[in-house]
Image (cartoon, rainbow, N blue to C red):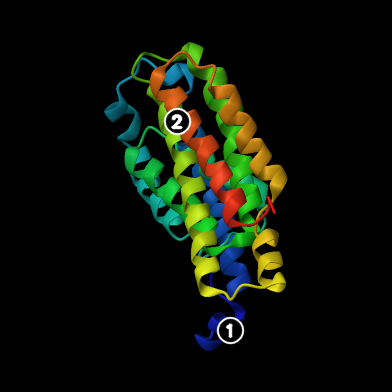
Amino acid sequence: MISDSIVKEIGLQNYYEPIRKTFDTILKMLDTQVGRCLLVTRPDNANKDTDDLLSGDRKPKIDLLRTCIATLPRLLPLGTSQEELIEMLARLTIHMDHELAVQAFQSLQYFVIELPEWRKSVFRGFTNFIIREVTDQLMFLSDTGKTTLDRSMRFLLQLLQQWKHVLINSTNKQNTGANNQLSLSQQTDMETLAMAEGFGIIALCQTHHSRRKYSVMILREVKNIAIASKCLQ
């Protein structure tokens, strides 16, 4: 994220707020026009040709949306809450444009790694998104589209792994002591971990083998995070 000192150093202090407001407007407009309407979970997109949906007038807008997503979290929109921004990024991870979906997930990873204060919103938002938007829509999808749940579970697993690595690296850099342990504990929201754990337990009921495998791995990473953050002590 661009700090105030960097903004002042490059001489943008008078323009930074208008830039963020404009960025917010652009993001919302693009999400409405070429974002949420082109998700693989939408029933009206199930039997249509992907190339046709992503071509024409939509293509330059999708390219611009990719560029905007790539700026996150270095540039944050002004006017969109944490929850709304994370919900948009989570939604774009199942976009029909593969590059945009990957870019949205990478931005979520950057939030987890670089902004500890955003981790709660990232994991709660992404877990709720899977439950609400992915699992509830599977009945409308083709066999190919049903891999969306597998991919979303893999993304959640990777986000948890990133969280674990951040905590382990923090532990290695710090001296052991009560203050350091408190600092690590403050980076870990137990309610958020409980939500991810609950999702993993429920997903164990899936009939598909790969999803049950992801469930076990998610539960293992939740435990690893709790241990790394010393929340179990």
The picture quadrant where one finds residue 146 is top left
- The amino acid sitting under disc 1 is Ser
The picture quadrant where one finds residue 8 is bottom right
Residue at left 30%, top 22%?
49
What residue is shown with label 1? Answer: 5
Residue 185 vertical position relative to residue 3 in the rendered view, above or below: above
User: Marks 1 and 2: which is nearer the front?
Assistant: 2
Residue 13 vertical position relative to residue 34 in the rendered view, above or below: below
Q: Is residue 11 left or right of residue 45?
A: right
Judging depth in this view, the residue of 129 and 80 nearest the camera is 129
- The amino acid sitting under disc 2 is Tyr
Q: How many marks?
A: 2
**What is the C-alpha distance between the residues marked 1 and 2?**
42 Å
Identify the element where label 2 is drawn: helix
- Whether tag 1 and tag 2 are in contact, CB under 8 A, the answer is no
What residue is shown with label 2? Answer: 214
Q: Is residue 135 visible?
A: yes
